Image: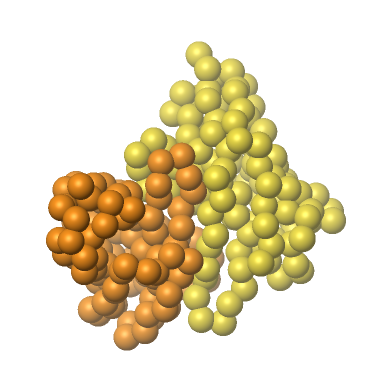
Chain colours: A yellow, B orange
């Protein structure tokens, strides 16, 4: 299974872009990169995912390097409500289910 | 749609007592999961169910049993609770296609 490495914590000023990095140097060709976040005491929430192309949705953008060994989640205009733990996950391929392994994640603090 | 619901929200048990945590989803998802999250840590998979009628062990199954009652419901049972099982328990479900997981609000369990 591919492992991911994220910084344990980051700060971001309100209104600025938050760029959260993730290293997944052992990712295999058919594994996707998923991002979730967990706001304090709540269940995790899906944000975005991608295979090799950059992706954007209403919440965030995902930039994956050409060699797929790292990626960056971008929150374009961070708000106080974006303060949360962000998990970068590499999906383990399986024929029967979608096993997701959560690491410790990055604790993002958005500062007024 | 309610999404994923869990009951109870909070529970205090004495060592050796038993209890069942309930989870239900209304998204017609095939796969369901139980995770535990200890303070300051990521989520760890306890058990999962790829489809109705099937269950499999995850990373930390010892001390737990599960039942996939039907497509909607997936319960987690502690037969003889121990203080080491004090944790927040999250249920999740996922469908086919994008396979992102949808999480419930969690059950906060304390075993004295």
Residue at image x 53%, y 54%?
Answer: A102
- The residue positioned farthest toward the right in the image shown: A67
Q: Is A11 placed above or below B46 here?
A: above
In the image, is B10 to the left or to the right of B92? Answer: left
Task: Look at the image and tell me whether residue B104 can be seen.
Answer: no
Residue A66 percent across, percent down from the top left: 84, 53
- Residue B18 coordinates in the image, percent (x, y): 16, 64
In-image side of B11 versus A83 (left or right): left
From the viewer's perspective, is residue A86 above or below residue A81? below
Residue farthest bottom in this picture = B53
From the viewer's perspective, tell me whether residue B59 is left or right of residue B104: right
The answer to whether residue A108 shows anywhere in this view is yes
Quick one: quadrant of the N terminus of chain A?
A: bottom right
- Residue at 39 percent across and 59 percent down: it is B35
**Which image quadrant for residue A30?**
bottom right
Q: Position of residue B75 (x, y in %)?
A: 25, 69
Write down the quadrant of residue B28 in the picture: bottom left
Viewer-nearest residue: B62 or B11: B62
Q: Nearest the camera: B76 or B111?
A: B111
Q: Residue at horizontal 59%, vertical 23%?
A: A11
Image coords of residue B33 (percent x, y):
39, 66
Q: Residue, x 66% and y 37% (percent of image)?
A: A7
């Amino acid at each position: 299974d591919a492992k991911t490495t994220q910084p344990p914590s980051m700060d971001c000023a309100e209104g600025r872009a938050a760029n959260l990095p993730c290293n997944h140097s052992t990712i295999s060709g058919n594994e996707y990169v998923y991002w979730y976040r967990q706001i304090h005491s709540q269940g995790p929430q899906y944000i975005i995912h991608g295979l090799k192309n950059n992706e954007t949705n209403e919440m965030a953008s995902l930039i994956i390097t050409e060699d797929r060994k790292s990626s960056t989640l971008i929150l374009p205009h961070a708000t106080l409500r974006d303060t949360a733990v962000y998990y970068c996950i590499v999906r383990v391929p399986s024929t029967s289910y979608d096993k997701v392994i959560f690491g410790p994640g990055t604790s993002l603090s958005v500062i007024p | 749609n309610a999404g994923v619901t869990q009951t109870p929200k909070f529970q205090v048990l004495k060592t050796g007592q038993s209890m069942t945590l309930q989870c239900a989803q209304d998204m017609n998802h095939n796969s369901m999961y139980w995770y535990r999250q200890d303070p300051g840590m990521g989520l760890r998979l306890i058990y999962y169910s790829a489809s109705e009628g099937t269950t499999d062990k995850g990373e930390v199954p010892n001390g737990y049993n599960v039942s996939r009652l039907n497509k909607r419901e997936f319960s987690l049972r502690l037969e003889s609770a121990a203080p080491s099982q004090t944790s927040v328990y999250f249920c999740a479900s996922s469908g086919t296609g994008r396979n992102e997981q949808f999480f419930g609000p969690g059950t906060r369990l304390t075993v004295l």
